[in-house]
Amino acid sequence: MTGAVRIAASILAADFAHLGEQVASAQRGGADAVHVDVMDGRFVPEITVGPVIIEAVRRSTPLPIDVHLMVVEPDRQVERCVRSGATSVTVHAEATTHLHRVIQQIKDAGARAAVALNPATPLGSIEPALADLEMVLLMTVNPGYAGQRFIPSVLSKVTQLRDWIAARRLALDVQVDGGINDTTAGQAVAAGATVLVAASAIFQGAGGIETSLRRLRHAAMVRT
Ligand code: DX5
Ligand code: ZN
C-alpha cells in the first residue's frame, strides 16, 4: 500500500506557455505523478483544461498522469480522459449519483479508479465503495482554485480513513489535495496521507520547480 509518500505535481499553477518544460522540471525534481485538474465551470466555478492538455502532458513525460475531474456527470468524460493518457481518474462523490457504476467505468477503460470528497463531505458516502477503489482523495480545500489555504479539520478525516483501510485490510492510497506546502505536508503524512498533491508549492515555490519539489519531499518526510 504505502511505502514512501508520493508527490503529484498539479500543473494548475504551472506556466502553460511552457508546459512541457515545466513538467520535465517536475520530473527531474522527483515528482511521482502529474496531476491534471479538469474543471467544467459547473461543479466548480472555473473552466480549466481537458483531454488536449492530458495528451500534451502524456507527450512530455512517462510519469503517471492523475486526472482529477471536477465536473458534473463525470461518466461522460472518463473514456476520453483515459484515451488521452490518464493513468488514474478521480471523480467527486458529490458529482455522481451512481458511484459504483462510474468506478467500474474507469476500470473498464483501463485506469486506476479514485473518488474525491470535498472537505464537508463525510467519509460515510464512500464507505460502500472502498473495496473497489485504488485511491481516495480527501480535498483539503474546497475545489476550484490553486493557492487556497489548507483546512486543518480534514486531518481527522484522513486519520479516520487510514484506520478504516487498516481495519478492512485494504490497500488503497489516501491522497490529499489543496494548500499542501512545506508546513502542511508533514501534517498530512502524519495523519495518514500517502499521496500529496501540490500546485503552488511546486510551480511557484522559491528557487524554481526542482528545488521546490525536493523541499516539499523533505518536508513530507519530517513528521510533525
Ligand atoms: C484545487 C485543485 C488542486 C489545486 C491545488 O481545486 O484540485 O489540485 O491545483 O493547488 P495548491 O496546491 O496551490 O493548493
Ligand atoms: Zn486536484
Image (tube, helix red, strand yellow):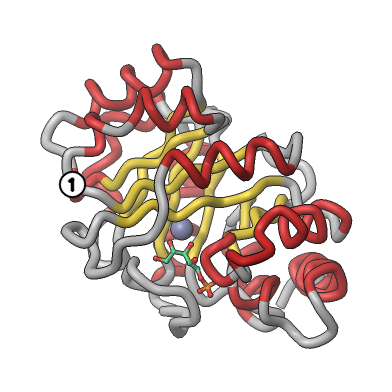
Q: Position of residue 69 (x, y in %)?
A: 35, 46
Residue 27 in view, yes or no? yes
Q: Position of residue 76 (x, y in %)?
A: 23, 30
Q: Please give the name of the residue rendered at 76% of the width and 71% of the height, measured from the top-left corner.
A: 216
Q: Please give the name of the residue rendered at 47% of the width and 23% of the height, measured from the top-left corner.
A: 83
Q: Quadrant of residue 206?
A: bottom right
Q: Position of residue 15 (x, y in %)?
A: 62, 70
Identify the image quadrant of the C terminus: bottom right
Q: Please give the name of the residue rendered at 51% of the width and 48% of the height, measured from the top-left corner.
A: 162
| Amino acid at circle 1 | Val
Q: Position of residue 73 (x, y in %)?
A: 17, 39
Placement of 180 over or under 123, stated as above or below = below
In the picture provided, is 89 more to the left or to the right than 8? left
Q: Please give the name of the residue rendered at 51% of the width and 46% of the height, measured from the top-left corner.
A: 53
Say few, some or many: other residues with alpha carbon within 10 Å of mark 1 (under 14 / 14 to 19 / 20 or more): some
Which sits in the foreground, 12 or 118? 12
Query: How many dots with numbers?
Result: 1
Q: Which residue is mark 1?
A: 72
Residue 190 in view, yes or no? no
Which sits in the foreground, 190 or 205? 205
Residue at the front extreme, as displayed: 17
Q: Quadrant of residue 56?
A: top right
In the picture provided, is 42 more to the left or to the right than 81? left
Placement of 14 over or under 20, stated as above or below = below
Q: Quadrant of residue 166?
A: top right
Identify the image quadrant of the N terminus: top right
Secondary element type, mark 1:
loop
